[in-house]
Image: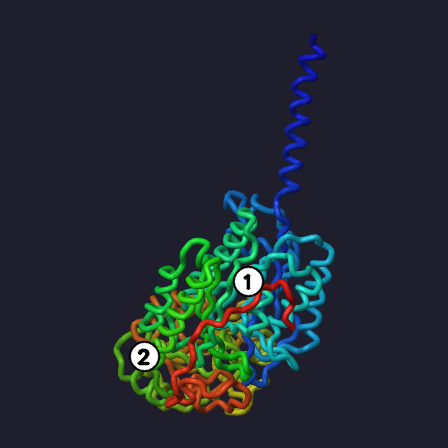
Amino acid sequence: MKKLLFALPLSLLLLASSCKSDTTKELPRIAIAGLAIESSTFSPAVSHEDAFRTRYGDDVYSYYPFFAPDSGIIDRAVWLPTLRGHAMPGGIVTREAYESLVGKTLDSLKAKLPLDAIFFDIHGAMSVQGLDDPEGDFLVRIRELVGTDVLISTSMDLHGSVSPRLAQNTDLITCYRLAPHEDAIESKKRAVTNLLNRLKSGKGKPAHKAWIPVPILLPGEKTSTRIEPGKSLYAEIPGVIDGDNVIDAAIWMSYPWADAPRNHGVVMAYGDDKEAVGKAAEKLAEHFWNVRKDFEFVAPTVYLDEAFEKALASDKRPFIISDMGDNPTAGGAGDVTWTLHEILKRPELKGSDAKSLIYASIPGEEFVKKAKEIGVGGKIDATAGAAVDNRYAPPVRISGTITAIHEGHPNAKTEVAVKNGNTSIIVTERRMAYHYEQDFTKLGLNPRETDIVVVKIGYLVPELYDMRADWLMALTPGGVDQDLLRLDYKRINRPMYPLDPDMENPDLSAQFIPLSDEILK
């Protein structure tokens, strides 16, 4: 009798274990892969493989908070992370770096076959030597490996570009709806949950994908969703989504600092109802085109001399000036010295009664090395900058007292603060954009109590935006010059607004993209 009592729980345990095993087998096998960088072809900078922060295997999860144990997502599939690489925006990626990163991704995917689906997480504005459409090429090579039955969901930055090849070889596609991109993680989660829902329902690939090229190419600083018309344009997206009829819709502004045929606005929608999908895409595309002339810079924008005249006359602090033309977060080399030369020439910023100013920042590896040898409190007189992009000004001579040295930043490596009169200049071992108050305070600088803060970025990220007492964006030269009429475009499709302001209205009819049942090369 005791044996029977013992055997019963054991048999139930084995049955439960078997059921659990069967459940695990039924879970879809989903790989995670992607490369993300914004690359300017108007900059002399070049991005190598070491520019990418690559995550492999389980380390990939650290990038996605929605894969937390209690998220309700992690247990819906067998997740198979491969390589996810992310680089700070910069110059064109070398072909060698691209081939290496793609090759490593394909090798990892091959080891994880068979697959039911892939979460393909990209930016969409990568430029590669000798390739016009790197993300499209990457996806084709993935398709050739995994086949056309695998469901692929693509997440992108709204400043990416969507070629017909990329549109066909993916099945579900979306992008951010906010600029600045405060919804980045939310958008990636949407790409994942849409994928999981189609797998769970058994419906698989949406029946229809509408793609509409919109001949508009504008910088992000003019298309921020903080202000109109971008705010209302992107706010219209949820209203066109309708269950499985229209699963999702997206608007890409594209990237104006790459000179390639794919660089232009795009609207896409997808779902199971062809008429609804087409109407959703056309509604958004027509709205986009109709407000094209209403896009303005997100803040008052002037050339540098006027920016300084206004900052010097202001009693507000901090008065922030964006040094936009060499913005490393948009793809600039980050080492153009033109603005800093102009600052150091201004007599109003010299003398003990001058206004306080922080300049953030300029890279100078040898300068930093010398500063470390001298130490905090010592005097330094050395040059920095213009090692990559010297088209507008030579290296800048910086002299003063070293007030702080901070080591160990993941991007900048070592940072040095040097004070010359009331001007503090941050010199970094590697190029760096300063976004947060702690970026300054760890160097003993207080941006809130400084009269003028000059940062190498475009529109202000939320923390600086909230900190500002006043703000101007300065049209300065560099690889991401905001004055697009100064850029020498040769290969984008024309006509293009605003380069051709009097162009005729384009055909904004929905173009239905074939499903990924065949690989479009």
Q: Residue beneath label 2, please?
A: 294
What count of labels does the image hold?
A: 2
- Where's residue 270, x and y in %? 48, 62
Judging depth in this view, the residue of 491 and 244 nearest the camera is 244
Q: Quick check: marks 1 and 2 in contact, CB under 8 Å?
A: no
Judging depth in this view, the residue of 15 and 394 nearest the camera is 15
- Where's residue 442, x and y in %? 47, 65
Under mark 1, the amino acid is Thr
Q: Residue at x 40, y 70 (%)?
A: 282
Q: Residue at x 66, y 53 (%)?
A: 115
Snapshot quadrant of residue 516 = bottom right
Under mark 2, the amino acid is Asp
Q: Secondary structure at mark 2?
A: helix
Q: Callout 2: 10 Å neighbours few (<14), some, many (20+)?
A: few
Separation of residues labelled 1 and 2 (CA atoms):
30 Å
Q: Callout 1: 10 Å neighbours few (<14), some, many (20+)?
A: many
| Residue 103 in view (yes/no) | yes
Whether residue 373 sits left or right of residue 220 in the image: it is: right
Q: Secondary structure at mark 1?
A: strand
Mark earlier in primary sequence (1, 2): 1
- Where's residue 170, x and y in %? 58, 64
| Vertical placement of residue 409 versus 326, above or below | above
Residue 322 is marked as none
Q: What colouring method underlies this structural image?
A: rainbow
Q: Quadrant of the N terminus?
A: top right
Q: Residue beneath label 1, please?
A: 154
Snapshot quadrant of residue 104 = bottom right
| Residue 419 in view (yes/no) | no
Whether residue 287 sits left or right of residue 108 in the image: it is: left
| Vertical placement of residue 307 versus 49, above or below | below
Q: Residue at x 69, y 59 (%)?
A: 146
